[in-house]
Image (cartoon, grey):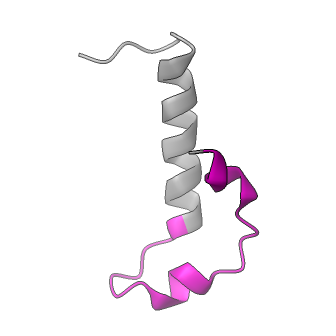
Amino acid sequence: MAKIKECIHCSQCTSKCPYGLDTPKLLEKKLEDYENVAAGRVKVD
């Protein structure tokens, strides 16, 4: 998860994605979700 913070938004992964996903944006959202769960701000069922 810590590697996500090192993303430089070069869009190389986005341009290579066969589904056209905005990978950096998706990773940032998942990191935010992870940090909220880890800090106890959000409960997971």
Look at the image and say whether residue 19 sits in the magenta stretch: yes
Residue 12 within the segment the image draws in magenta: yes
Q: Considering depth in this image, is 30 or 1 the residue closer to the camera?
A: 1
Quarter of the image holding residue 7?
bottom right
Q: Position of residue 41 (x, y in %)?
A: 53, 12
* 12 relative to 27, above or below: below
Quadrant for residue 18, please give it.
bottom left
Can you say whether 1 is above or below 7 in the image? above
Where residue 5 appears, as percent x and y from the top left, is 71, 51
Above/below status of 14 relative to 30? below
- Residue at 49% over, 57% down: 26
17 to the left or right of 9: left
Q: What's the residue at 54%, 23% (across, down)?
A: 36
Where residue 17 appears, x then y in whole percent?
41, 84
* Start-end of magenta stretch: 2-23
For residue 17, side relative to residue 15 (left or right):
left
Quarter of the figure with the C terminus: top left
Name the residue at 64% across, 54% down.
Answer: 3
Q: Position of residue 33 (x, y in %)?
A: 49, 33
State the quadrant of the N terminus. Answer: top right
